[in-house]
Amino acid sequence: MTGRVRLGRRALFALAGVAACGACAEAPAAPASPSPAGARLHTRWDTRSDGPVPAAGDEGVPFVVTVNGPPGPPSVRAGALEGNLPDAPGAAYVNQDLGTPLRRVGARFSFGPGEETGSLCLAAWVALPYRDTHCHLVVTPRRWIYGVIRDLTLSEVGSGTFARPLPQDETPVVVEAVLDGPRATLHLPDGTTTSLDDPRIAAAPGSIACWEFYKYAAGAADVRLHGSWAT
């Protein structure tokens, strides 16, 4: 079953129990967690000083930051990048341009207390302002949703619910999406690995890696980003 929604992903939260079972298969994670080793883009936010988002990542590629809604821009605090979203709907996007189609994007991140309407999204945009992407992986404390966006329409490719909710005491977890043609291999923060096969994943590959902080409603959990990488 596939969901389609115009101009946003809010309706996907209503599809909590809907998974594309024919398109994905879950298996135990490999012994080693996903790692930024070998990534062309890599920033360790836990080594950055408190303050505004730096001009560039650890590798020297510039950041482009945009916000949607009333929040101020993200900033570094106490060893992590924070979205600085108010207790209301909003989003903050931290982007870096690889210059070539993205094949891997990941993050080391954590959740604070709050509802699962707070999330982290990994994306790969074709261009800015945001339009198309073959990778739109949303992670909440309880579930994940993978989609693609074409012509401003978001379509769900696969989704699932974690057997146990992710910690919400700012304990870091790791998520990564690896893209290879029509296949997306998702290394999820609960330690499972899921593969999705869909021709839409191969269409319109993006080169702009994005780490998005998102809140759908008041009471949503905050996200802290401890590390980000992409290839």
Image (cartoon, helix red, strand yellow):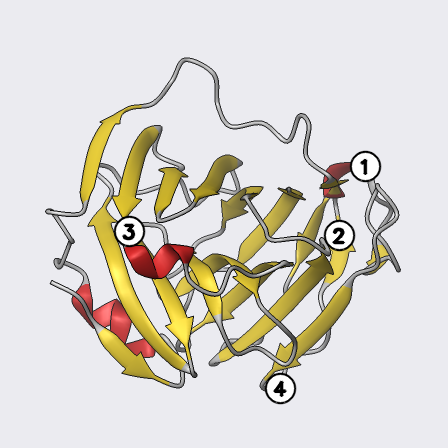
Q: Are marks 3 and 4 in contact (CB under 8 Å)?
A: no
Which image quadrant: the N terminus? bottom left
Where's residue 135, x and y in %? Answer: 45, 57
**Residue denoted by label 1:** 47
**Residue denoted by label 4:** 70
Mark with earlier residue (3, 4) = 4
Q: Quadrant of residue 76?
A: bottom right
Amino acid at dot 1 = Thr
Which image quadrant: the C terminus? top right
* Above-or-below relation of 78 to 95: above
Query: Mark 1 to mark 2: distance in Å?
Result: 10 Å
Query: Mark 3 to mark 1: distance in Å?
Result: 29 Å
Q: Are marks 2 and 4 in contact (CB under 8 Å)?
A: no
Mark with earlier residue (3, 1) = 1
**Residue denoted by label 3:** 143
Q: Residues within 10 Å of mark 4 (few under 14, many from 20)?
A: some
Q: Are marks 4 and 1 in contact (CB under 8 Å)?
A: no
Query: Mark 3 to mark 4: distance in Å?
Result: 26 Å
Amino acid at dot 2 = Arg
Where's residue 93, x and y in %? Answer: 63, 68
Mark 2, secondary structure of its residue: strand
Q: Are marks 3 and 1 in contact (CB under 8 Å)?
A: no
Query: Mark 4 to mark 1: distance in Å?
Result: 28 Å
